[in-house]
Image: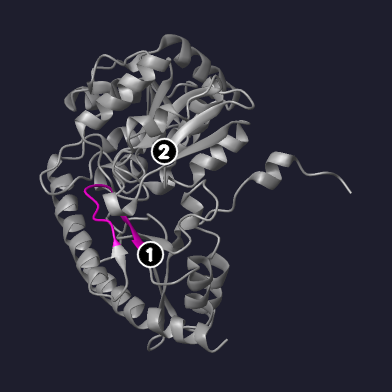
Amino acid sequence: MPKISQKGFEMPSSPIRKLVPFAEKAIRMGRKVYPLNIGQPDIKTPKIALEAIRNIDIKILEYSHSAGIESYRIKLAKYYQKHHIQVNSSEIIVTTGGSEALLFAIGSIADPGDEIIIPEPFYANYNAFAIASGAKVVPVISRIEENFALPPIADFEKLITPQTRAILICNPSNPTGYLYAKQELKILAEICIKHDLFLIVDEVYREFVYDGCVHHSILSLGNIDQHAIVVDSVSKRYSMCGARIGCLISKNKEFMATALKFAQARLSPPTLAQIASEAALDTPDSYFEEVNKEYTLRRNTLIEGLQKIDGVKVAVPNGAFYCIAELPIDNADAFAQWLLEDFQLDGETVMVAPAAGFYATPNTGLNQIRIAYVLKIEDLKRSVDILKIAIPAYQEYLSKK
């Protein structure tokens, strides 16, 4: 029998998608499933992006430049400049989603056995991308009791070894919704400068911040130019997850030259999606104002509902559209599967993402779930009602086993 690679065995299943077969079975049985597991917004994609595809007039669907269509990169640079990030088009590489940007970033800075420090819980695919590059994730724990704020500097520094190559964060965070303050970013920058590390910041949710908070890009700090790498994407910003367009940004020329070699090896990002993404940059600010109002209402609806369920602890997010909830159960994986296989309330149930998959520390987050509040208000209210009934029903189910 041919042998599968060790990294193939080590590659984790997605905590976001691994329960899909159970959801599909529930739907085939006639149940309605509310998908709280995945960050797929129901917000409409800007018409200007869709019209750019409908009205396209090309004779040959060609490769683009490996770094992305030049006009798109120039326009992206203007977008970032508007957000106080002074970059030019040569400091941007367009990628096939933020996922490829992360793969290029890790592949460019880490050799097999090298380490990347990441506050956990973190976006589950960070672990997968590290494994694909032969690198090792070294977790530093942030806690729900502290709303998943930045852990103390000492917690980072005691983990730094000769193999450490970078610190990686998501700001605002998937899965916690935590928004890093400017002072926290400065602290991270100081650590990376002191130890000569890269600071990779996933900023794909930069537009989604609430309660008067402000998002600060790591590239707006200035003093960390040679250490900073930013990952970005159109997926959530413009509700264009299927476009699969992201980008990698850095002022470090050696890093960008290295990342470009990875980009050349995959030839080019998809041309049609780049055309739509370039057009999306003309989306008016009013679009984001309305979207933020809607997400604020959704967040409030979800958090207030969860806080009323006995035994549930929830961190309040200031950005993105996720939260981590701690439940009065021992095993969220088993609970999430039970919701789909064995539970229904008037023919309806919910699909959640067990949070253990967002941790690298073994046996951590076992009683937590991640919820994406990307559904309309009435669906979120109904989902909370279902969870309110399901949790004690599950506890009773376990007591009878």
68 vs 340, nearest the viewer: 340
Residue at 23 percent of width and 27 percent of height: 79
Image-quadrant location for residue 286: top left
Height in image: 47 above or below 107?
A: below
Q: Residue at x 53, y 56 (%)?
A: 363
Which residues make up the magenta segment? 314-325
Q: Position of residue 192 (x, y in %)?
A: 38, 20
Q: Which residue is mark 1?
A: 36
What whole-number distance in Å separates the C-alpha atoms at marks 2 and 1? 27 Å
Residue identifier under label 2 = 273
- The reply to whether dot 2 and dot 1 touch (C-beta < 8 Å) is no
The image position of residue 368, as x and y in percent, is 41, 62
Residue 304 in sight from this viewpoint: yes
Q: Which residue lies at the image location 29% right of the left edge and 76% below the top edge? A: 310
Amino acid type indicated by mark 1:
Leu
Q: Is residue 111 magenta?
A: no
